[in-house]
Image: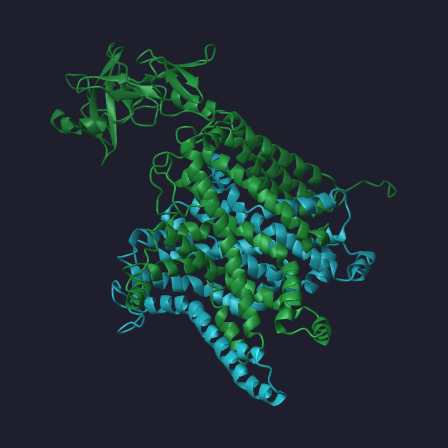
Chain colours: A cyan, B green
Amino acid sequence: MSQTREFPVSGVRRAQSRLPRKVLGMFIRYLIAVILILFAVIPALWIISASLNPAKSLIGGTFFPQNPGFINYEQLLSNPFFPYVIWLGNSLKIAIITTALTVFLTSLSGYTLSRFRFTGRRTLMMAILVLNVFPSILGMVAIFSMLQQLGAFIDWLGLDGHAALILIYVTGSSGINVLLVKAYIDTIPLELDESALVDGATPWQTFRHIVLPVMTPIVITIGVLTFIASYGDFVIARVLLKSSENLTVMVGLQLFQTDRFDQDFGMITAGAVIAAIPIILIYIPLQKYVIDGLTAGSVKG
Amino acid sequence: MNKVSLVIPSRVYVLHLAVFGVFLAGALWLITSLFAAGLVPLGSALSGIVVFLALIFLRRKFTPLRWLAISIALALLFTLYPLLYTLFLSVTNMGSGHLMAKQQALARYESELYLPAEGETYRWAAYQAGEGVYALWLIGEDGTGRLAVPGAALRTAEAVEGAGALDADGFPESLAGYERLPLNRTVPLLSQLSAIDFGEAPDAIRIRSLREAAALQPRYRYDAAQDALIDLETGAVYRPIEGTFTSEMGDELPVGYIDFVGLRHFQNFLGSEGFREPLISMLLWNISFAFCSVLFSFGVGLVVTLLFEDLPGKRVIRALLIIPWPIPVLISILIWRSMLNPDLGFVAPVLEAIFGASPEWFSNPLWTRVAVILVNIWLSYPYFYVITAGAIRSIPGEIYDAAVVDGAGGWNKLYHITLPLLLRVMMPLLIASFTFNFNNFNVIYIFNFGNPPMPNTIVPMGYTDILISFVYRLAFISSNITNYGLAAAITVLLFLLVSVLVIVQLRFTRLFKEAV
């Protein structure tokens, strides 16, 4: 390539040399693309392949199983020691309740912050922003100890319960999302809900019948982000939950993996594949909302 | 009559009041219980929140704060309070053996009973009503008979129905619902029976021998005047020293209470040699891990955007490249853990075939560090790819047109237009991502639990441990001793470090300017 620069060439020769150069460039770019695609795709393919491999353990693991089948899945779903189905159910239950509560609270709060003027409003928003930039994981020791103390008096609000976990998720995902909703409602013309208020509607009616229908996109975005985050969380659930039948699927898989990696490798991979399915099912049709949300609310990685 | 106007509260308002009343009653009960148990920080926090809620809800006029109240209350309880409580914990000794307030610890000792070697004794006979259910018939020194069952008050012979005729020793030969155990069947049960407290505290009876049973007595008495716990069995006097009840001989009782230790934890890890050095190397690794993760994830995302955005087939390439994104983090890391596993994965055989050797991804400090960064890149580059692609597309085409007119080539456009503009847009994101990765517990812990372990450290630490996974180790892993106080002190250090990042980040954040 450097030759063209060292030897000044005529216009005709330059045109001739441009074509192979372009082809070479394309070739290199496709080569890089293939390498990166392998890097991206192989782990995902590998876990599927491993989950279909009936061999108990893959000593020196081959990438393509000899006689693929669903035996790992059958064993996983009927395993008495690791109640995988219960874990999956717990995770879905927790994620759905968290999402519903978060969507409700953030819509209402975002609307209030956008449409009403009251003392402390700016301070409140500043506080939300500042408090939520601290990763919630930094509070885990304190939260653990707090729930230990609460649980001594209110059983269901203590450690090893789902209620506290859901409340922590709701709090964690509310902060920045409130600001997202608020910013979204700011773009909705004020006349829309003002006219309703003038006609004698209460704030609640205005919110419910006028504003809520218009803000569907942001509600979906927040719902999807919250679901993905709460379903996929590991650390808070790991710290709070103890008894086997209360675990979420992520914590369960991790313990399963730590305890019985060699023995039950196939089952663990099958468990990983199944656990990923709910998120992928939500992600594929609603990808646009995920990207919108992450681009706008990029404060929390 | 019609002119008289009464203020009739609306039904909704009455309903609100009722619901709030129930909530208030529950909250007050909880707060009093917390204070009674000596849990002052949590009690005070909840009191504050309840007062706040009461102020908002009891005003009849609609106030906008009403719709924010629940969110604010949750944020106060689960975000702000833990932050403050961490500060509090960092100057206490909370951890194994120091988990409760002083009142709770004292109450626990005062409810502890022991079987005195002397004092009034009973003769006894055992009765059985099914597997593991026993009762004792006791005959005191004055000859009166009593029935003792676990968990209920003693009953005098007259109050017991269904007791049969007394035998030569004065024990009823039969008892309704029970079977009398003869001596030969009692002997093998002796150890089982002597573990049961018959009767109800404070009048609990325990078997001392085959012949004797005696009333249990409280073992400890707290003497508030000299702030000491007196062991009535041995006569030893335990005085609290930094939350541990210690006798004059230096013996310590296992259960202590939460007490202030000042800045000892901070002095520990800043002052003591054995702590400071591994901690500094951990901090350096923590920073490099976050920096490399952000740099390479952003780098890959950027390269992918620049190389493929105008390539034929870019939609397919793009779809394939963001495959790692929707997979939950824990699962992605488990996949990498299995792939790199020397026995089960396929990476080791492949590398051995090509290079003749495969790195020790889980036991060699350097290679484990490489592995966690690699895994983290896989997890996070799709995000940067999508964001970078969006940001580059949003750069107005006219700027490039103008540059081309001025004679700029491809590299010039990239250096002087695309990169500077992109960096300005991405800066807050990059800093946020650095903050996030600085505390990226998941990758570190799930991949290899922060291991391989560092040799000869005072508390267990690993070569891939970052500060937050070390905090987790201190608080939740060290199987014998947990140390919340020290863990909290390191968290405080983390808060300070993150605060610096946050301040830098807020300067760049668009959302901040828009919101406020």
- Which residue is most to the left? B184
Q: Position of residue A98 (x, y in %)?
A: 54, 53
How many numbered marks appear? 0
Q: Position of residue B228 (x, y in %)?
A: 42, 14
- Which residue is most to the bottom? A12
Q: Position of residue A292 (x, y in %)?
A: 62, 64
**Which part of the image, by quadrant, shows the N terminus of chain B?**
top right
- Placement of B36 over or under A133, stated as above or below: above
Closer to us: B22 or A175? A175
Closer to us: A291 or B264? B264
Quick check: A20 left or right of B247?
right
Residue depicted at x 11% and y 27%: B184
- Placement of A261 over or under A149, stated as above or below: below
Closer to us: B230 or B329? B329
Quick check: A269 left or right of B145?
right
Q: Is residue B188 visible?
A: yes
Q: Position of residue A184 (x, y in %)?
A: 70, 60
- Placement of A151 over or under A163, stated as above or below: above
- Which residue is most to the right? B3
Quick check: B369 left or right of B83?
left
Q: Is residue A289 visible?
A: no
**Residue B177 figure quarter:** top left
Closer to us: B439 or B137? B439
